[in-house]
Image (tube, helix red, strand yellow):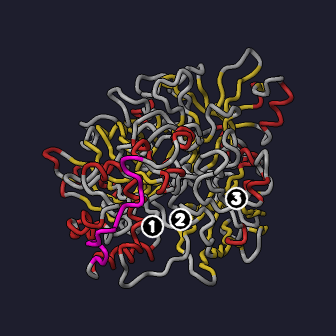
């Protein structure tokens, strides 16, 4: 049950995501049209957007342990009972901050945290616990803040992952919860963790600019469980904007139901004040067809007869700072009729309603079905000929247990299926720069050519899960041959659908077409052969692109389009380009550079930096003035591309 296990502790506070927004706009990757106008701070879709000088950093701010839950389900928030209460949760002291990284400017809905280490420090900054967080993409991106949106960002998201490379301080044994977690992680060497973000402030100016709220939960990791999602019973809201996706788990051996509303309860204020929905209850339905019953009672389809739900308990969300104290997680002892029903009946979240009916806010998926993907965000280097193959795994569940024999369809995503005008998506052209008719930088199409990706050697396949409820398919990826012109590689999406589970209960389709929050999302890179003894001309376009996209570095540290400046800082450049991918100092921070290109840059630094002293070496970018017409410059500010910075937390 992943992070919903006992024992566990929760922490909360703030996070800072000092994201760089220049690289959010795919048009900024076209070097010849880039000007320093694209470094100007402005609202989304203009200039360098709202945070052009961001360093892509992700850090914990003023976070501390709020509550612990022991193996028997008992809890405390009293430091006298467990000294870990109130202790700081942060990153390593005197080390670089983690990085929040998009997969691509044309797919910003699977942001990952790279290089994050969670640490708990005791008095005098003595380490109690340290663990590295394995990178994991956004899960359950959903609306949190209701109008008015004081922070400019209505959405929140979560990351489910594991802590590894665990270190335990000498005084960790003084804490009962840390002692329990140390014992239970002895075999696996890992702990499960969940991070939830909301209330991110992207309005320019103000004390909380680039800050948001963060909830964290740490529990034992169970061998065999998935690492990047909770094998939970999924609860889905009846409305797109409230309680959209929630996790719950029922522990049969203890008769305890756990529900996590930390990532779903609607907020009246971005700092963590829940919307008042009345008295909030959790229960179990007497019939396993709640959504069908709702249609029978009211035109609003949210009322159900009171005799059709067995109440289990009330969620005390109105308690002051409830969400920060508990991370939104509640536990209930289940007994009587509810205990008999809950193994195979839908869990329901509801309020009082009227004299005869309850008002249902959310309920478990149809027939308790769920499907989730493991390791679903991929960065893939291709070969000049042949395919690169890897296995992709999804897991199916019913009522929180593995579901063998489930029918799953895997399908490649095509933008043409959802576009108002499919013609450009059916036969897209490689963007070659400026559209002569409009004066605008041509934006590339994604998800083509479709033949670059095969599933078990086919376009689409339907298979059954094995005895463990798992389905594995072989994904074959071929060189896309530079379909996007001025930006490396291509974005491909593969969706998967579980037979018997409605689409809206699998993916968040409430906005932005079909963004496949749990699909397989791939950045497939162009095939590139490492150059052993490169010239500057072999890497100048790459380096200039990074120079343009990271003004924080370009203005204050090093102009990456100038080989002489790079040569003068050879040691630090070589250090950054040879770090481990999980190192927070790895360069480039976006993790979008193919291995062949990275090695070529390293080879240039180590084989004499050929061409660095040539007088005719000039940056490809137009750094001070652009030869483009004023009409082109104006056109570059007109498009308002919908990306995750218009919708999500980073």
In the image, which disc is placed on residue 593? 1
Percent x, y of residue 460: 77, 67
Asked if residue 36 shows in the view, the reply is yes
Sequence-wise first label, 1 or 2: 2
Viewer-proximal residue among 537 and 97: 537
Residue depicted at x 57% and y 52%? 107
Give the crowd class for mark 1: few <14, some 14-19, many >=20 residues within 10 Å.
some
Residue depicted at x 58% and y 56%? 433
In the image, which disc is placed on residue 488? 2
Q: Is residue 287 left or right of residue 375?
A: right
Viewer-proximal residue among 258 and 324: 324
For the record, the magenta segment spans 609-625
Percent x, y of residue 2: 50, 55
In the image, which disc is placed on residue 495? 3
Q: Is residue 59 left or right of residue 407?
A: left
Q: Is residue 442 magenta?
A: no
Mark 3 or 1: in front is: 1
Sequence-wise first label, 3 or 1: 3
């Amino acid at each position: 049950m992943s992070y919903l296990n006992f024992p566990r502790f929760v922490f909360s506070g703030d996070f800072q995501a000092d994201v760089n927004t220049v690289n959010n706009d795919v048009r900024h990757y076209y070097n010849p049209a880039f000007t320093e106008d694209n470094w100007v701070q402005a609202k989304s879709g203009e200039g360098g957007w709202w945070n052009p000088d961001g360093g892509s950093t992700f850090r914990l701010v003023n976070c501390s342990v709020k509550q612990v839950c022991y193996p028997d389900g008992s809890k405390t928030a009293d430091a006298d009972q467990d000294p870990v209460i109130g202790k700081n949760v942060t990153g390593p002291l005197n080390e670089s901050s983690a990085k929040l990284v998009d997969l691509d400017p044309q797919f910003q809905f699977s942001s990952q945290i790279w290089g994050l280490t969670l640490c708990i420090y005791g008095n005098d900054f003595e380490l109690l616990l340290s663990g590295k967080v394995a990178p994991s993409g956004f899960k359950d991106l959903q609306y949190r803040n209701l109008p008015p949106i004081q922070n400019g960002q209505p959405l929140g998201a979560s990351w489910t992952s594991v802590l590894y490379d665990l270190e335990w301080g000498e005084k960790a044994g003084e804490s009962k919860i840390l002692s329990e977690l140390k014992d239970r992680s002895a075999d696996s060497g890992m702990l499960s963790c969940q991070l939830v973000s909301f209330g991110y402030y992207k309005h320019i100016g103000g004390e909380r600019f680039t800050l948001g709220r963060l909830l964290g939960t740490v529990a034992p990791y169970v061998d065999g469980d998935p690492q990047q999602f909770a094998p939970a019973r999924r609860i889905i809201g009846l409305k797109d904007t409230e309680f959209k996706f929630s996790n719950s788990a029922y522990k049969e051996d203890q008769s305890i139901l756990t529900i996590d509303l930390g990532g779903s309860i609607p907020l009246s204020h971005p700092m963590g004040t829940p919307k008042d929905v009345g008295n909030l209850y959790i229960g179990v339905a007497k019939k396993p067809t709640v959504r069908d019953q709702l249609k029978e009672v009211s035109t609003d389809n949210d009322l159900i007869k009171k005799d059709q739900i067995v109440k289990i308990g009330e969620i005390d969300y109105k308690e002051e700072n409830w969400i920060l104290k508990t991370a939104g997680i509640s536990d209930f002892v289940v007994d009587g009729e509810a205990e008999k029903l809950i193994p195979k009946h839908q869990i329901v979240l509801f309020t009082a309603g009227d004299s005869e009916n309850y008002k249902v806010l959310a309920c478990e998926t149809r027939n308790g079905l769920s499907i989730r993907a493991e390791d679903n965000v991929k960065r893939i280097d291709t070969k000049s000929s042949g395919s690169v193959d890897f296995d992709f795994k999804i897991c199916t569940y019913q009522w929180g247990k593995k579901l063998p024999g489930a029918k799953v369809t895997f399908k490649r995503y095509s933008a043409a299926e959802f576009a108002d005008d499919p013609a450009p998506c059916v036969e897209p052209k490689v963007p070659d720069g400026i559209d002569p008719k409009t004066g605008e930088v041509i934006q590339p199409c994604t998800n083509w050519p479709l033949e670059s990706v095969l599933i078990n050697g086919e376009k689409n396949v339907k298979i059954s899960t094995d005895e463990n409820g798992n389905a594995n398919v072989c994904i074959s990826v071929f060189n896309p041959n530079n379909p996007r012109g001025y930006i490396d590689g291509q974005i491909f999406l593969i969706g998967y659908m579980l037979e018997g589970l409605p689409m809206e209960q699998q993916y968040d389709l409430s906005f932005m077409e079909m963004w496949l929050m749990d699909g397989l999302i791939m950045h497939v890179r162009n095939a590139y052969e490492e150059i052993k003894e490169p010239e500057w001309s072999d890497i100048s376009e790459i380096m200039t692109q990074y120079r343009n996209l990271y003004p924080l570095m370009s203005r204050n540290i090093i102009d990456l389009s100038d080989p002489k400046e790079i040569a003068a800082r050879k040691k630090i450049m070589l250090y950054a380009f040879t770090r481990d991918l999980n190192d927070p100092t790895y360069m480039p921070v976006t993790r979008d550079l193919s291995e062949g290109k990275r090695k070529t840059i390293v080879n240039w630094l180590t084989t004499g930096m050929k061409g660095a002293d040539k007088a005719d070496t000039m940056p490809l970018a137009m750094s001070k003035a652009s030869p483009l017409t004023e009409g082109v410059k104006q056109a570059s500010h007109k498009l308002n591309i919908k990306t995750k910075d218009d919708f999500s937390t980073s």
